[in-house]
Image: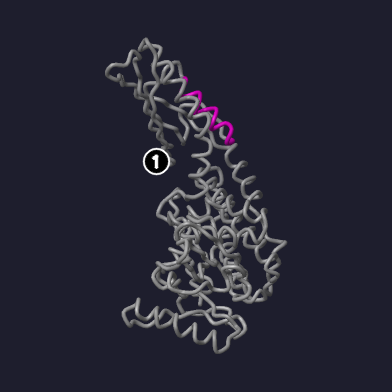
Amino acid sequence: MSKVNIFCGWRKGGNAAGVILAGCVILAGCAGAAKPATGGSLEDSRAAAYEAIDAMNRGGRAAPAAAKPASQGLPAASAAAPASAPPPAAAAARAEPEWVSSPYSVYDQDAYIAATGYGENRTAAERSALVSLTAVFGQSIQAEISTITNYSEAVNNGSINVSENNAVREAVKTSSEMDSLVGAEIADVWQNSADRSWSAVAVLEKQRAAVLYADMIRGNQRLINEITNIQDAEKNSLEAFSRYRLAATIADANKLYATLLSVIGSSPQGLNPSEIKGGSDYRLEAAKVARTIPIAVKVEGDRQNRIGNAFAVALGRIGFTSGGTNNRYVLNATLDLSSANLSGNQYQFCRYNIDAYLTDTSNNSRMSPYNISGREGHTAMNEAEIRAINSAAKKIDSEFEQVFDNFFSTNLLR
């Protein structure tokens, strides 16, 4: 049975640049293992045997509560904990469950979305089941899930505070680690005693998922409205930029959940999934803000401004202007070069290390830390140094834009 938790708040710091966000997201676990709707004397005997084996493996402790079959009418939300999959010993002792070959022979297709996965070990089988469950929704949904990794990161780093409930936090963490849908659960596992392979079944209860995603959309939309309510004095600041970027991240997740509602076939009262805004509108607003913000670039130890130019170009691609000496925002960086010779090697090596961060000179706060290091070799040390600097510049060119964007898409300035 699932548990729905709601936590919402907004707290503003003591200065204009400081903002602390306590997000509003509603997340929940999905149904636990449901028992088959059909039965008979043979099935009853099997069930009794499995329960006896499970009891022995538990040392006489009570079994975890299992979800009711769909035919018994599950409530939209429940405070009961989701059922746990059987322990490995019990899983190995059982005869092959029907869901191994046909998940919908056990989980009512009108009430559940279910899929079976297989693997050489339990973890692999569970991952396979969750991937298969996501695949039921189609390739477009799989692609959308992969694009909202920033949303999961924002939840995990506290920019979006899902709840004070650790179980909810773990559900979000699991879904992001396994690239699966929030609310999907492993309902049962089984090990084949003959070849020791594993099977697992993942389920998403439709009615509960519809309530879950609708509540997530409403809560996320309230949060978006809060963080995009920007005062005129803050409109041309990195704070405003970060607000719009995080709003875009949340809106991307909302668009996914709206699509899932459409696939599930549910349109909760007062919510039209087709009218849910995605993140593109908020990214456009962030780009407008970026064009009003000049960022100075200062690199200590630079050679012929190679590193400074690389940073300036990357910032330009994001939308910021660079240059100037009295700007509010400064990208400070330090380039360190050192010898890294290897014994017995004819080449001489130069190691580079670059530490960089943005500074808001109005309050001396630092943000968006960035560090890279590496080494390059040549028969002459001066050539090795040139290669090291070129290598560092290429690395900045290839990755700094994404690192910078990810930071502001998952954090609010505090």
Q: Residue at x 35, y 19 (%)?
A: 350
Of residues 398 and 377, the one nearer the viewer is: 377
Q: Residue furthest left?
A: 343
The secondary element bearing badge 1 is classed as strand
Q: Residue at x 49, y 61 (%)?
A: 23
Which residue corresponds to mark 1? 366
In the displayed structure, 318 sits above or below 125; it is above
Q: Position of residue 251 (x, y in %)?
A: 61, 56
Magenta stretch in the rendered image:
306-319
Q: Position of residue 411 (x, y in %)?
A: 47, 50
Q: Is residue 172 visible?
A: no
Q: Position of residue 382 (x, y in %)?
A: 37, 11
Q: Is residue 149 left or right of residue 276?
A: left
Magenta residue check for 316: yes
Of residues 241 and 253, the one nearer the viewer is: 253
Of residues 233 and 65, the one nearer the viewer is: 65
Magenta residue check for 201: no
In the displayed structure, 271 sits above or below 356; it is below
In the displayed structure, 55 sits above or below 196; it is below
Q: Residue furthest bottom?
A: 41
Q: Is residue 108 left or right of residue 94?
A: right
